[in-house]
Image (spheres, grey):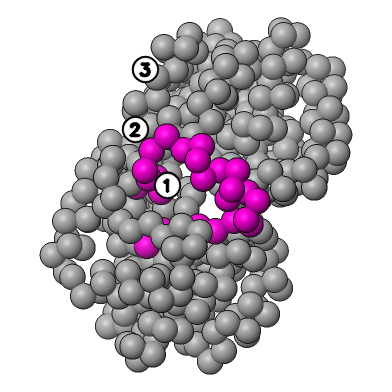
Amino acid sequence: MVAGEASGDMLAGLLLEGLKPRWPGLQSAGIGGPRMMAQGFDAWWPSSKLSVFGYVDALRHYRELVGIRNQVRERVLRERPDVFIGVDAPDFNFGLETPLRQAGVRTVHFVCPSIWAWRGERVQKLAAAADHVLCLFPFEPELLARHGVKASYVGHPVADLIPLEPPQAAARAALGLASTDTVVALLPGSRRSELAHIAPAMLQAAVLMARQRPGLRFVLPVAPGLLAMLRPLVALHAPGLDLQLIEGRSHDALAACDVTLIASGTATLEAALFKRPMVITYRVNRLNWWIMKNRGYQPWVGLPNILSQAFVVPELIQDAATPQALAREALAWLDDAPRCARLRQRFNDMHHELRQNTAARASDAIAQIIGA
């Protein structure tokens, strides 16, 4: 298995946990993170090695990434596993899966790349790379079938993990927050580049919110290893803010909060499954933005809006992501209980659709692929 960054490690960890009951003697190895290692995964390299974003970041680490990929390929070809599972990270995994498949190793790609959102040309690379694709969203298998790619809808494992009724009281108790507090969760992303580009405006927005609503409580879950980078940003952009930094525990923060300012990515889907109002934001460096801005196929960026095919939550991207706009949109949720109630119902329906016992569905698909 090869999984990149925190979201891939989470998905792969949940998948491994679900595969064990079917194959108690299962052995897994490759590139992974702490959640995978907790399931007995042998990590040749940590998943953080693949945590790059955008063209500039990828070019900076190109030589190292190619070297790692070549070493993984050679080792897999020597050891000949029953199946290779590439978890997301398509730019890295397609270049690995294709030669493995050509050499007779069965390949599964877990998470259909967002060809329906941008970079649709990747479907040809996917067709060459994967014997089978495990899809998180119900519309994806039909789309892939049009291109001759075999796929199964397995639901989203996070929808199985997150309870249908968010445990707000328990999460607040765990974080030392009162039931009467109004809580704002700040989730600026799990990559260093995301913190650098997104956290400053998000922290400044929190300061503006606190000025307008004294007594607001703020929580900010920090991805492992990034606390040292974040503390100076907090000191610079939000001195004196009533802000609780917590290492990991993003689900506690989402369960506890009344509204979240959140970076676009998997975390926005988690926020939707916790039925939380949100303001989605994203910023990248100017060159990445110039390359990416005209390559999208849909008006939406955030997963909750894409799945709803509507702007059910605000999106403030790049230059629109000013502290003033972020604060304004977040406070608007706190002032509109009927709007929040409608959003909760929409997210509840989404949760039921995505809650499919992913591990069982995925293990059934994998069993058919490897004939076990």
| Magenta stretch contains residue 292 | yes
Q: Position of residue 44 (x, y in %)?
A: 80, 38
Q: Amino acid at mark 3?
A: Glu
State which region is magenta.
279-304
Q: Is residue 281 left or right of residue 344?
A: right
Q: Nearer the viewer, mark 3 or mark 1?
A: 1
Q: Looking at the image, which residue is at 47% across and 12% down?
A: 147
- The front one of 37 and 3 is 3
Find disc 2 in the rendering and name its residue. Answer: 356
Q: Using the rendered image of the protein, determine whether residue 33 is visible from the camera's viewpoint.
A: no
Q: Quadrant of the N terminus?
A: top right
Residue 146 or residue 178, whichever sits in front: 146
Q: Earlier in the sequence, mark 2 or mark 1?
A: 1
Instruction: For label 3, count other residues whose C-alpha is less than 10 Å away and answer few (under 14), some (14-19) or many (20+).
Output: some
Label 1 sits on residue? 301
Residue 261 position within the rendered picture, expressed as x and y whole percent measured from the top left = 42, 66
Residue denoted by label 3: 142
Residue 69 locus on image (x, y percent): 79, 31
